[in-house]
Image: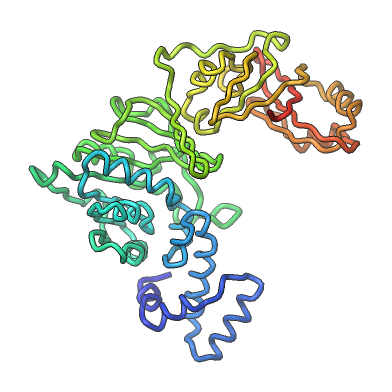
Amino acid sequence: MDLRTVERLVSGEGWGLLQSLPPYDESSAMVLAERLRAAGFDADLVSAALTQSRLRARAVGKFGTFAAGMMFTADGLEQATRMPVAARHAQRFRDAGVQHVWDLGCGIGSDAMALAGLDLAVTAIDADEVTAAVAGVNLRHWPRGRSRVGRVEDTRFPSGEAGRRVGGWLDPARRTPGIADVQGRTRRVFRLDQLTPSWDTVRDVAAALPAVGAKLSPSFPHGSVPPGSEAQWTSYGGEVVECTIWWGSLVRRPGRSALVLDGDRADLVTAPQADPDVPWVESLDRMGEWLYEPDRAVIRAGLTGALTATTGGAELDSGVGYVASAQVVEVPWAKRFRVSDALPLNVKGLRALLRDRGIGRLTIKKRGVSVEPEQLRRQLRLRGDAEATIVLSRVQGRPVVLVVHPA
């Protein structure tokens, strides 16, 4: 999509066409396009409108009812912050007393919308003119929000008294434009030195403004968390969606934390005050009857110690995340399973156990072992009407299998 197409879509004819389209249906899209062209609509405009309709349908999961009035680019939608998560970003700025936020690398404007929705002034900047124009369309309901074309590196921020209530938000591009993966999406990058703008530029902005946040990959390395900042890993509906670094007045608790969002529920997980060493299970016969699986954001944040401290348990092995305990504790950010069997991982022995119990349907969970679940499933030659869940992991560096039952 080019700038001219954006302008045509927001014109009277284009916007009217877009808003009049029925819910997107891939199976009938070609027939609908032919009917619209026959009705006198330009073919390029019809194609652009149907593309927006398709993207709006995909965007409902991130934006809910907002999606019906928004514009998108394919890459922008892929990288956009989910609205409930963006709302929490915005609330942190407001709680810190920030009055004007520079959204640097704004994309389609999801975070800018959340900020403007809390009546903060927002200047949304993107280096791509089409993306900046789309952000402008999405900000149209909020007079204190505006977008423009520009680079982070060239931005000049207010200074002196005018700069005291100013904040910065950055969402560096973590995909390579023009290079697609096997599913047709732009390819992700995982190294800090591949970000656009660069990690050095992000830190320069953090040094220049009193309140700065940056949305980064969930794979952000713990060793790169800047001193005095707060690194928060966030999951939404069980999926880890980001690691956000907060500087200045936006820091609530320096160090690492995990935010677990599920529906209307939000749980904040931090390291125990004493920050003890995480204990490990000594042997299978001493691991306890209960297995706890923390939310992935907790594991990404390296906060398994919070779960061992809460349950009085021990991690199966270093870095696997699963915690075994003899205690029953309700932990909102962890799933609990009862362990009925714990044995060294051996295909022949596991096959015999499952056969004796008539297990024909098997859920396989794993962490910390290099077993391919589907290959194992074939080797087990499952038969029967019963079902079970197994966990493949490590104890004392050796692969084990646990037969578990959700509590």
Which x, y percent locates residue 77?
Answer: 46, 57
Q: Is residue 67 left or right of residue 145?
A: right
Query: In the rendered picture of this protein, how many numbered marks are placed on residues?
Result: 0
Q: Name the residue located 40 percent from the left edge and 25 percent from the top edge.
A: 223
* 288 and 264: which is toward the camera: 264
* 176 and 172: which is toward the camera: 172
Residue 402 drawn above or below residue 295: above
Res. 12 image quadrant: bottom left
Q: Name the residue located 16 percent from the left edge and 50 percent from the top edge.
A: 156
Q: Name the residue located 34 percent from the left edge and 60 percent from the top edge.
A: 128
Quadrant of the rendering where the C terminus is positioned: top right
Q: Name the residue located 52 percent from the left edge and 14 percent from the top edge.
A: 278
Which x, y percent locates residue 178?
Answer: 47, 58
* 352 and 172: which is toward the camera: 352
* Chosen colour scheme: rainbow
Which x, y percent locates residue 127?
Answer: 31, 57
Which x, y percent locates residue 378?
Answer: 83, 37
Q: Is residue 288 left or right of residue 87?
A: right
Residue 202 drawn above or below residue 406: below
* 189 and 68: which is toward the camera: 68
Q: Residue furthest left?
A: 160
Quadrant of the rendering where the N terminus is positioned: bottom left
